[in-house]
Image (cartoon, rainbow, N blue to C red):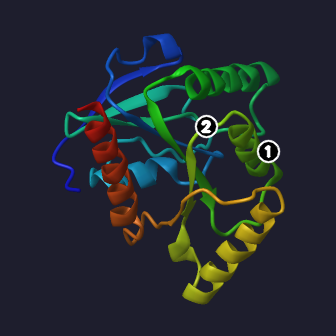
């Protein structure tokens, strides 16, 4: 898939104010500092489409980017940033859960995981919650350029093993690096594939 246009459309904290369209939405979420903005910029080949921030936990909004006029990338707030107040964490959780559970246009949720870290409880619980609620999601490992090839594969394998303790089958998994562009084609082809299935089922 070639991305010809990628335009920021709207930011808000209320799922009811999301764009009033029937276009499919692919949402990206992960813990603070997992490299979400960099990944979105890498996928769209736009250097500053999503704002990358040195301070983790900055995104408190649902950001919609319209791609090729046909579908959306949705940048969801990062979760699990410890330095937030409890009120702000609760508000954030509400924003995220409302979007994930109530937004019918959400076609797939990409859960970003830092490939350098051992499985984190918060990520495991979040994916468990997605499974319990029947939310279609994929796992995107980020920052693979920071690990050597063997170390990267070993890290992913041990992560999969951990997941298999609670999952009968694993969701689609993508290995990416915003630095070297790894995984870009696979992710975009996956989105393209879902989009064409959706349009053929509508005709």
- Residue 58 is situated, as x and y percent measured from the top left of the image, at 57, 35
- Residue 118 is situated, as x and y percent measured from the top left of the image, at 77, 66
- The residue most toward the left is 4
Q: Which label is found at residue 196?
A: none
Res 164 seen here: yes
Q: In the shown orientation, is residue 46 left or right of residue 99?
A: left
Q: Where on the picture, by quarter, is residue 96? A: top right
Q: What is the crowding at mark 1: few (fewer than 14 residues within 10 Å), some, or many (at least 20)?
A: few
What whole-number distance in Å separates the C-alpha atoms at marks 2 and 1? Answer: 14 Å
Closer to the camera, 199 or 7? 199
Decide: is 164 above or below 77: below
Q: Which label is found at residue 135?
A: 2
Q: Name the residue under label 1.
A: 125
Query: Which one is earlier in the sequence, the residue at label 2 or at label 1?
Result: 1
Task: Say which residue appears at 65% left-offset and 84% top-offset.
Answer: 151
Q: In the shown orientation, is residue 170 left or right of residue 17?
A: right
From the viewer's perspective, is the residue at label 2 or at label 1 nearer? 2
Res 47 seen here: no
Q: Where on the picture, by quarter, is residue 199? A: top left
Marks 2 and 1 in Cβ contact (< 8 Å): no
């Amino acid at each position: 898939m070639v991305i010809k246009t990628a335009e920021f459309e709207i930011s808000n904290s209320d799922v009811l104010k999301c764009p009033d369209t029937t276009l499919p939405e692919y949402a990206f979420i992960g813990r603070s500092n997992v490299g979400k903005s960099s990944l979105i910029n890498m996928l769209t080949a736009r250097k500053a489409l999503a704002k990358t921030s040195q301070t983790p936990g900055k995104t408190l909004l649902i950001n919609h980017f319209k791609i090729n006029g046909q579908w959306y990338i949705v940048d969801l707030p990062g979760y699990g940033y410890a330095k937030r107040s409890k009120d702000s964490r609760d508000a954030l959780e509400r924003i995220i859960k409302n979007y994930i559970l109530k937004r019918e246009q959400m076609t797939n949720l990409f859960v970003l995981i830092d490939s350098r870290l051992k499985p984190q409880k918060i990520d495991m619980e979040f994916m468990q919650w997605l499974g319990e609620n029947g939310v279609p999601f994929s796992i995107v490992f980020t920052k693979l350029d920071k690990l050597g090839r063997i170390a990267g594969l070993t890290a992913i394998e041990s992560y999969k093993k951990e997941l298999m303790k609670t999952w009968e089958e694993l969701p689609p998994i993508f290995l990416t690096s915003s630095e070297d562009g790894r995984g870009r084609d696979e992710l975009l082809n996956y989105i393209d594939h879902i989009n064409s299935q959706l349009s053929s089922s509508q005709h």
